[in-house]
Amino acid sequence: MSGFEGAATMLDADSPEPLWRQAAEVIRNQIASGKLAAGGRIPAERDLLEQLSISRVTLRRALQSLVEDGVLTSSHGRGWYVSADAPREFPNTLESFSETAARLGLIPSSDLLRAEIRPATLDEAEILGIAPGIALFHLDRIRRLDGVPVAVDTSYFPATLRSDFSGVDFRDSSLFQLLLEAGVDLARGETTIEARAADAELAGYLGIEPGKPILAMLQLIVDATGKPVLSSTVRYVGDRYRLRTSFSRSRKAGSRS
């Protein structure tokens, strides 16, 4: 309940966006931040009405919209529950999959698909700004949250950064943490997110139908000097993740008439 305290001040009756949509967004945010756990029951309607200061009709419409989006499920006479596969938000800060899971109160795990060293291709060398043929460490994994497959992560980096992973169990180890322990500076991630369709192989890994939409996050991590150190492509099940960001308008832009 405490997570909804003050929520009414977030709703704007003068906004062109309907109150039910605003209320639904407040509940989405509670879920995305991990304050409402997957599979758990959300506060009772009477408590939500008090905290959000809206009518029962408005609240019911907000809740029903979340059911239609797969965020909530309803149980007659028992209340409303967060779906096990409710969408999670991409972080606005650079953090590992394990760190994101911890923030959401979920247990991360992985199925190892590949962990090997091989020469950089022309494309890989161009991305990392190195010479073709330089040894790269490749790591491919199916990423899970509470046992549910949510993404396939394909990463590679120069093996000179850390080539010895003997004794490392990549099913529950964080690559970020391993690189940080080796003294690698992971300062910033240059990221592109695009929609794609799942091919048969990816669909099999994620337990979805071929052709289903996925979100592909292509990320190049650089150190404080801007030197590329790690490239990754993480392909998420499209309806299990979403991206939230904010934009600020430059003061210079407002100076033109």
Image: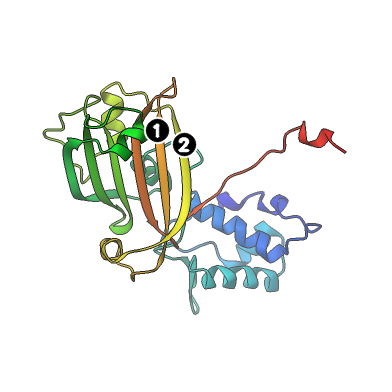
Q: Which mark is residue 221?
A: 1
* Type of amino acid at the residue the image marks with label 1: Ile
Q: Which mark is residue 30?
A: none
Vertical placement of residue 179 versus 48, above or below: above
Quadrant position of residue 57: bottom right
Quadrant position of residue 121: top left
Residue under the point 35% across and 31% down: 128
Residue 195: where, in percent of width, then height?
46, 58
Q: Is residue 23 left or right of residue 76?
A: right
Residue 98: where, in percent of width, then height?
33, 42
Q: Which mark is residue 190?
A: 2
Q: Earlier in the sequence, mark 1 or mark 2?
A: 2
Residues at marks 1 and 2 touching, judged by CB atoms closer than 8 Å: yes
Residue 185: where, in percent of width, then height?
36, 23
In the displayed orientation, state which residue is furthest to the bottom.
76
Residue under the point 28% across and 29% down: 179
Q: Nearer the viewer, residue 252 or 71?
A: 252
* Label 2 crowd bin: few (<14), some (14–19), many (20+), radius 10 Å: few
Q: Nearer the viewer, residue 104 or 185?
A: 185
* Label 1 crowd bin: few (<14), some (14–19), many (20+), radius 10 Å: many
CA distance for labels 1 and 2: 6 Å
Q: Is residue 144 left or right of residue 237?
A: left
Q: Which element is circle 2 on? A: strand
